[in-house]
């Protein structure tokens, strides 16, 4: 089945630095990937839609200059948290859907990245 | 995007059948219903998806009434390892269509 790989699974960084998170679709091409954020004991919150070869679409309230998204190929999207601060500490999860073939293929998720900003 | 409503939590015992119902009154004609399971510090895992009537796979069944305004995820004979948060999502299935998560249901299975 469709597999989405996310890296790293855990990262600790100092306040003011930037962190890049990678999301790869391993066995399918994904023209679109989605980035979510999840706080402890809360549901997933959609941050942005990553579009291959074009600009990402951000949800209301998400700073595009803070969370840079690049989707340079059909199998890779990256999320860079710039000038990270402790309040950016969270669980970031990417997802993608195999858009070829069946139109109702489900969304598949990576295993998430736990970001801790000290 | 259709909004979903689920119970915040449910309790069960090992070996029991668990049914989690999700309400989605404003589901659109081209929307599918998908259920996910999430363990702590992991990404959500796909369980089952359906459009209407009943769908069954090796882990669960999904019941959808004719009006499609609700759906019920049925987990047969749960075990302790089924303790997790279960999310019901409603949305169109195209590659570019986003899905919005609701609150989910925390299922706690006790021995």
Image: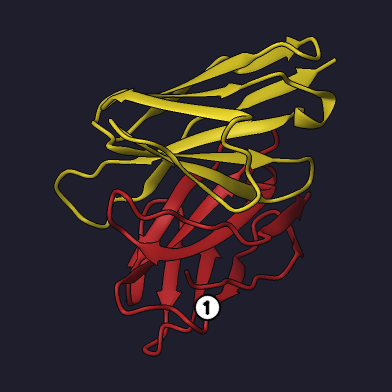
Q: Can residue B77 be seen by looking at this rendering?
A: no
What tint does the image give chain A? yellow
User: Between residues B104 and A65, which one lies in front from this camera angle?
Assistant: A65
x, y percent for residue B62: 43, 68
Q: Quadrant of the C terminus of chain A?
A: top right
Q: Which chain is red?
A: B
Against B3, residue A35 (above or below) is above
Left of B79 or right of it: where is A23? left
Q: Residue at x 79, y 40 (%)?
A: A40
Q: Residue at x 53, y 27 (%)?
A: A68
Residue at mark 1? B24
Q: Label 1 neighbourhood size at 10 Å, few (<14), some (14-19), many (20+)?
A: many
* Secondary element at tag 1: loop
Against B87, residue B67 (above or below) is below
Direction front: furthest residue: A65
Q: Residue at x 41, y 56 (%)?
A: B48
């Amino acid at each position: 089945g469709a597999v989405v790989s996310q890296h790293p699974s855990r990262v600790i960084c100092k306040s003011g630095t930037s962190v890049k998170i990678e999301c790869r679709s391993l066995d399918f091409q994904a023209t679109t990937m989605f980035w979510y954020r999840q706080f402890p004991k809360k549901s997933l919150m959609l941050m942005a839609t990553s579009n291959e070869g074009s600009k990402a679409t951000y949800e209301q309230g998400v700073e595009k200059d803070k969370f840079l998204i690049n989707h340079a190929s059909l199998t890779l999207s990256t999320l860079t948290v710039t000038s990270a601060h402790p309040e950016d500490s969270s669980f970031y999860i990417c997802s993608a859907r195999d858009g070829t073939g069946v139109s109702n293929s489900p969304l598949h998720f990576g295993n998430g990245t736990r970001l801790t900003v000290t | 995007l259709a909004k979903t409503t689920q119970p915040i939590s449910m309790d069960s015992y090992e070996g029991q059948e668990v049914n989690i119902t999700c309400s989605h009154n404003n589901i659109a004609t081209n929307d599918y219903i998908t259920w996910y399971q999430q363990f702590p510090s992991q990404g959500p895992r796909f369980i089952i998806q359906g459009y209407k009537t009943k769908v069954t796979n090796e882990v669960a069944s999904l019941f959808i009434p004719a009006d499609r305004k609700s759906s019920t995820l049925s987990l047969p004979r749960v075990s302790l390892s089924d303790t997790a948060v279960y999310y019901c999502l409603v949305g169109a299935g195209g590659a570019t269509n986003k899905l919005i998560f609701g609150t989910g249901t925390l299922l706690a299975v006790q021995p």
